[in-house]
Amino acid sequence: MPFTLATWNINSVRLREALVARLLTEESPDILCLQEIKTPVEKFPMEQFQALGYRYMVARGQKGYNGVAILSKLPIMDDGDKDFAALGHARHVAARLENGVSIHNFYVPAGGDIPDREQNVKFGQKLDFLTEMRDWFRWEKPDRAILVGDLNIAPREDDVWNHKALLKIVSHTPVEVEHLGAVQDSGNWVDITRQDIPSGPLYSWWSYRAADWDGADKGRRLDHIWATQDIAAAGHSSRILRPCRGWEQPSDHVPVLATFDL
């Protein structure tokens, strides 16, 4: 069963409902995983998406902050969630397809501005969140699973616009990259995007602070699609939809897509 999956930090689904509808209309992924929906589930604007064929949804919402959702044309079952690092945040939800493949949708904490847990509580929370992810996947060894989301870390040198300049900037510090690598190793996860696009600069986020985001091109690859090794070979056709950053009232993130033949 081939299907295309997209992940997108939408930065408020109610504010950007029209952009989600545009993506669903133009790209028509079978599954769309959203992060930072910033709404309780009961206020999620589902009607327009259902009219476009996305009849299934599992989500965890939160008023004004965080929140994750999985929209699907394909039947999905709610497969639970976990409150990593006991933050009380809606940052994870899982769904299961009829073929048994599970999909984990994550929104990892951004971590604030100072990469020091002693000076910055948020950075410590981010590292603790990643440590719990690592331990959970070691214990609950995943198989036939896909992990997506805004992981808020650009791990490779070519995942950021300037490796040396960002070594002390949250999202690319060595300690964060090490923690993310431990999560990846714990579940034997394969980075599908880099499996398909193995070299060269690749970004999915550009700051709102840049007046000319496209010209300056100071991007980072914060959004990821991973798969367990048993199904990684079935993943292909990865794309990052850079033009979405230029849409009216855009998110600072753009969608990342991959197709799986399962």
Image (cartoon, helix red, strand yellow):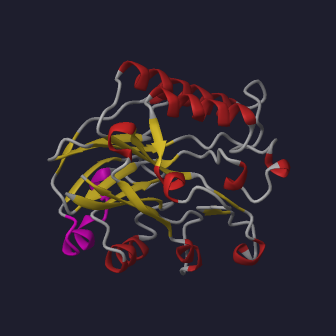
Q: In this view, does 172 lie to the left or right of 56?
A: right
The x, y position of residue 39, in whole percent, is 39, 54
- Residue 80 visible to an observer of this rendering: yes
Instruction: Reply above or below: 226 against 177.
Output: below
The answer to which quarter of the image holds residue 120 is top right
* Closer to us: 113 or 15: 113
Q: Position of residue 58 (x, y in %)?
A: 26, 49
Q: Is residue 18 above or below residue 110?
A: below
Identify whether 76 is placed above or below 133. Answer: below
Q: Give the range drawn in magenta.
A: 41-54
Residue for point 55% across, 72% down? 250
Residue sitting at x 75%, y 69%: 210
Q: Is residue 43 magenta?
A: yes
Look at the image and tell me in which quarter the N terminus lies.
Answer: bottom left
* Residue 235 drawn at (x, y percent): 37, 54
Residue shown at 16% from the left, 46% from the top: 99
Image check: 202 left or right of 186? right
Query: Does any portion of residue 38 appear in the rendered image?
Result: no
Q: Which of 45 and 259 is in front in this view?
A: 259
Depth check: 257 or 249 in front? 257
Instruction: Determine the residue positioned at 85% across, 51% down.
Output: 165
For the view shown, which residue lies furthest in the front direction?
233
